[in-house]
Amino acid sequence: MIKARKTRKIRIGSIDMGGDAPIVVQTMTATKTGDVEATARSVNELVDSGAAIVRVAVDNIGDVEALAKIRQRTHGNISVDLQENIRLAERVAPYVDKIRYNPGKLNSVDPETPWQKKVDYLVEIAQRYDCALRVGVNCGSLDATLLNDPDVRKKIEERVADKCIGAETPVSVLSAIEHTDYLESVNFQRFCVSIKDSNPFTTLLVNRLFSSLRPEVPLHLGVTEAGIPPRGVLKTRVALEPLLAEGIGDAIRVSLTVPAKDKSKEIEAGKTILANVANGVVANPDLLNANALDVVSCPSCSRVQNERFVELAQQIVKATEFAKDYPFKIAVMGCRVNGPGETDDADIGLWCGGNRVNLKSGARDLGSFGYDEIIEKTLELLNQKIQIYSAAQKVSPLSDGDYVV
Ligand code: SF4
């Protein structure tokens, strides 16, 4: 039984999100946005599968021109993801219903301009073109100012102190609070928030906390980089089903690493999650061993630089099965936009370029390798980490962060 939600209702194209509106399922295209036929076909297939909103990535003027044509050929509600290209907002807004911005990417371009001015610009564009906004906080690309400046953090912490007594509020939640408060201070309320982490338990906690602090703000829920199904679906269930049962969450996205033509699997998984919760079924968190090897991978989008990415992620999952009992995180990402940053917190990171794959140990770059040699290099590195970890465990058990390769 899903508890009633307390969020305000906002309109996104032809649908309402929040309040007593039905919880909607969202997804994203993974075709090249510049390929108008393929992307329009994908949007329509996803809408026909039950997607209430379909997100499309836009990186340049060519993508904007393609989006104008895609809009004419599709019948769904379209959201756009601009990452650091927020200056394109004015050009894409006529063709979309929602614009997602990432607080952690606002300073990637023109860092001298305060982020508030950039948000003012997005608000003005959203109002002019009848769009909603999504504040999309991603734990892999948090706002560097909040991360590094204790004074800025403290000011926001003081605003939520009554609800967070004794606990240090996660930076992701502070970032969402900061943007929520700012948008409301400029009288803009037609926005939702998402706070995503690749760890389902963290996703659950930060959304529960944000919802208790700002219960009126519509929430889009998802586990970022959930990865290959079926584990990617299970991770998402573990995070989302308890939240939805508590009446938290107005839209959901299941981010699965699947080929572009199979993106409707995200919708199927989303609908199953909603049906489970409606029937009183909530995933058992014990099904996910928090100390097991975890391979996270992005769901891919128009920015994927080599279509072998999905196959590579599948191969990494298979090739590392032997290490399933070791508490390492391996991140496999599809492009240079989020790849370098969102692999930093993994023990082993791979991010795909056009012809080569970049390998990292923690935040340290180890060079780039061909698609045919990267599996072997990854396994070499994993075996080194296992040796060091095992030796350290024999001497005295260590916490996960106490060793490096
Ligand atoms: S890492 Fe790159 S390819 Fe993967 S979903 Fe994010 S932006 Fe798209």
Image (spheres, rainbow, N blue to C red):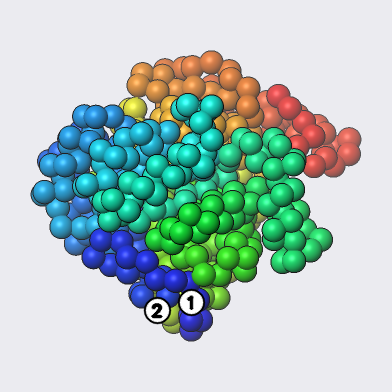
Q: Is residue 90 visible?
A: yes
Task: Write the residue at 47% across / 33% down.
Answer: 338
Q: Say which amino acid is labelled 2.
A: Asp
Q: Is there CB contact under 8 Å for labels 2 and 1?
A: yes
Tell whether 378 sits left or right of 264.
Answer: right
Q: Residue 282: which numbered mark, if any? A: none
Q: Is residue 320 above or below residue 156?
A: above
Which quadrant: the C terminus? Answer: top right
Q: Is disc 2 placed on a helix, strand or loop?
A: loop
Q: Quadrant of residue 130?
A: bottom left
| x then y, percent, for residue 344 | 60, 32
Q: Position of residue 163 (x, y in %)?
A: 72, 66
What amino acid does circle 1 point to? Arg
Which residue is at 28% across, 50% downward? 128
Q: Is mark 2 within 8 Å of ligand 1?
A: no
- Between 193 and 376, the one lying in front of the other is 193
* Nearer to us in this view, 405 or 205: 205
From the viewer's perspective, tell me whether residue 236 is left or right of residue 96. Answer: right
Number of numbered discs: 2
Instruction: Give the image location of residue 59, x and y in percent.
Output: 32, 32
- The mark found on residue 5 in the picture is 1
Q: Residue at x 53, y 15 (%)?
A: 367
Q: Which of the 4 quarters of the picture holds residue 145?
A: top right
Mark 2 or mark 1: which comes first in sequence?
1
Instruction: Kindly identify the residue that appears in the image at 54 percent across and 27 percent down.
Output: 112
Disc 1 residue crowd, few under 14, some 14–19, many 20+, Cα 10 Å: many
Q: Secondary structure at mark 1?
A: loop
Label 2 crowd bin: few (<14), some (14–19), many (20+), radius 10 Å: some
* Residue sitting farthest toward the right: 395
The image quarter in which residue 32 lies:
top left
Identify residue for label 2.
Answer: 20
Q: Is residue 404 above or below residue 124?
A: above
